[in-house]
Amino acid sequence: MNDKTKPPGEESVSLALAQIERSLRGSTEIDAIADPTLRATYVKGLGWMQRFIMRPHADLGRKGAVCPFAKPAHEERALLFCAFDAADMSFDIYIDTLMRMPRVFDQLATQRAESSDLLSLAIFPIGLNADTYYKFIDCAHAILKPFYMECGLMLGEFHPASTVAGAHSPTFRPMRADVPLFVIRAMALHDALFIDGESTSLGMRVHELECYLRWNAHRLATSEAQHIEARLAQRKAQLFDDSVATV
């Protein structure tokens, strides 16, 4: 397909993906970055991770670090950073760009000399205005999460004004970061904590449970798999009952 026949916006998406590829660095390699804006963004992001999510917190509601896997991923050189210029980017182009990231993540996983279950990719959309975080981070996450889960991935959304509550404490704000970013990683067993939430629509809850089973069934103990299957059957029954009630 030549430039004249590319769909509208494809050139902008290609440009953003090229920026992501050029900016890709391990979290232990950011001091060598020449671009001052990129280096400052990564330094601020890593500083927040080391100060907050890699450590325990009194309000977390459980023992251990806020994210038990962040520090091991960093130390194992399995935590990667990338960025793109999101300033003045339209929302549709922004979403289109992020829809391509599961393929990027899979390519990175394939190219690694040693595979790691800890592989994580932090994406920093540079240039977002604070008054658009709700749209470009929170709303984008709601749009993207079902697709990422279909691909066997989880997508975390973080920004300075996040109001997302912790899984173990309704007053804790684990997604409140110094800079806006997303983090991609492979779905894990503990992600049962982050799906099938009461505030989520029934259809979405069914989708989340289906994806969780598809990607984790081989790792689940028989009793755990049966528990998830029972939850899924219950949600499907509720979905059917609600559908019948509205006819």
Image: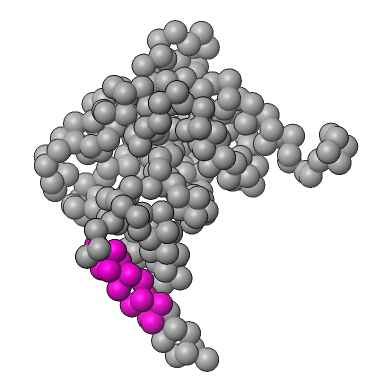
- Residue 234 belongs to magenta span: yes
Q: Which residues are magenta?
A: 224-238
Q: Determine the image quadrant of residue 159.
A: top left
- Given residues 224 and 72, the one toward you in this image is 224
User: Any magenta on residue 100?
Assistant: no
Residue 26 horizontal/vertical position (percent): 42, 20
Q: Nearer the viewer, residue 70 or 45?
A: 70
Q: Residue at x 45, y 50 (%)?
A: 152
Q: Is residue 152 above or below residue 200?
A: above
141 or 86: nearer the viewer? 141
Q: Is residue 88 above or below residue 190?
A: above
Residue 114 percent location from the top left of the image: 40, 26
Main SS category, magenta section: helix
Left or right for 33, reference 237: right
Instruction: State whether residue 35 is above or below residue 3.
Output: above
Q: Residue at x 52, y 91 (%)?
A: 247
Q: Is residue 61 in sight in this rendering?
A: yes
**Residue 49: which quarter of the image?**
top left
Q: Residue at x 28, y 56 (%)?
A: 220
- Residues 1 and 87: in front is 1
